[in-house]
């Protein structure tokens, strides 16, 4: 009884969000599958997000606040939820900008599954590294911190980085290339390690991506292929 009511609350809350036509990329999409981002822009039909995942997202937000609380008390936080200055092609907001011994850092907090062993984590996830490089690029701050928190154990692990201009410029260049494909209605190539890539396992567009094939294809032709093989709306 309660499960159904709670699930419905989250699903209804998600559906109530207005559909806004996309005009920019989100920093959280840096390093992510270009085809998945293309589908988001085109509002492609995909699997409905489950209530469980929506609760996970909300729990992640609460963990961020929990982590920031002692940093605020210690007087290390200069600003929180800071939007990047430029919004021409990318939009995003950093969790915080902090200062330690006079040195500013961009702080990005990531909550991860309790199944992951942080003690064995030797490097951050590539997409997280890409995100913080973009933050450093837009804020013009030379150093950043990725702080991981295990959702189950509350274990913490941090990685400290210097700004790498070549990495940030490459990410922005890839966004520009993808933008041109979106405008030209050209579905990008499927990622080479489909379907073993972790992104595929959680992608709401997994089914249509599988049906549509691996090659670049015109969006209208892609829609014809998937609607002929599924019950998706025409």
Image (cartoon, helix red, strand yellow):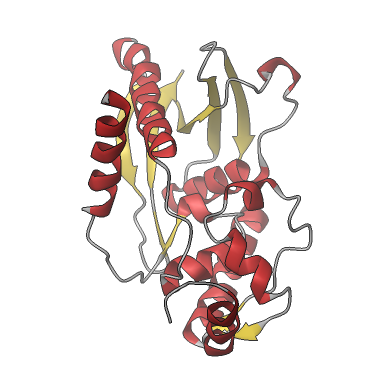
Residue 95 lies, in percent from the top left, at: 38, 35
Q: Quadrant of residue 9?
A: top left
129 or 105: nearer the viewer: 129
Q: Is residue 51 left or right of residue 105?
A: left
Residue 29 lies, in percent from the top left, at: 51, 55
Above or below for 30 versus 39? above
> What residue lies at 61% left-to-right and 29% top-to-bottom?
160
The N terminus: image quadrant: top left
> Do we see residue 164 in this rendering?
no
Q: Quadrant of residue 104?
A: top left
Above or below for 43 versus 124? below
> What residue lies at 67% left-to-right and 57% top-to-bottom?
166
Q: Residue furthest front?
A: 1
Residue 28 lies, in percent from the top left, at: 48, 49
152 or 47: nearer the viewer: 47
Residue 49 lies, in percent from the top left, at: 42, 48
Q: Quadrant of residue 51?
A: top left
> Do we see residue 74 in this rendering?
yes
Q: Is residue 67 left or right of residue 229?
A: left
Q: How many marks?
A: 0
Above or below for 10 versus 63? below
> What residue lies at 74% left-to-right and 58% top-to-bottom?
194
């Amino acid at each position: 009884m309660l499960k159904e009511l709670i699930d419905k609350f989250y699903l209804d809350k998600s559906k109530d969000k207005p559909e806004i036509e996309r005009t920019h990329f989100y920093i959280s999409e840096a390093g992510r599958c270009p085809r998945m981002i293309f589908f988001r822009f085109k509002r492609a039909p995909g699997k409905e997000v489950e209530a469980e995942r929506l609760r996970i997202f909300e729990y992640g937000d609460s963990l961020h606040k929990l982590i920031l609380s002692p940093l605020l008390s210690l007087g290390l936080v200069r600003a929180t939820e800071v939007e990047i200055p430029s919004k021409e092609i990318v939009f995003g907001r950093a969790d915080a900008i902090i200062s330690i011994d006079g040195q500013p850092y961009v702080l990005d907090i990531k909550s991860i599954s309790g199944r992951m062993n942080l003690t064995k984590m030797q490097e951050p996830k590539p997409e997280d590294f890409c995100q913080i490089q973009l933050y450093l690029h837009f804020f013009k701050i030379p150093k950043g911190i990725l702080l991981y928190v295990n959702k189950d154990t509350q274990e913490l692990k941090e990685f400290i980085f210097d700004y790498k201009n070549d990495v940030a410029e490459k990410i922005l260049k890839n966004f520009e290339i993808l933008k041109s494909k979106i405008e030209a209605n050209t579905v990008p190539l499927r990622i080479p390690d489909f379907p073993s890539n972790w992104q595929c396992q959680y992608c709401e567009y997994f089914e249509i991506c599988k049906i549509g094939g691996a090659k670049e294809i015109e969006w209208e032709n892609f829609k014809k292929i998937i609607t002929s093989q599924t019950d998706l709306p025409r």
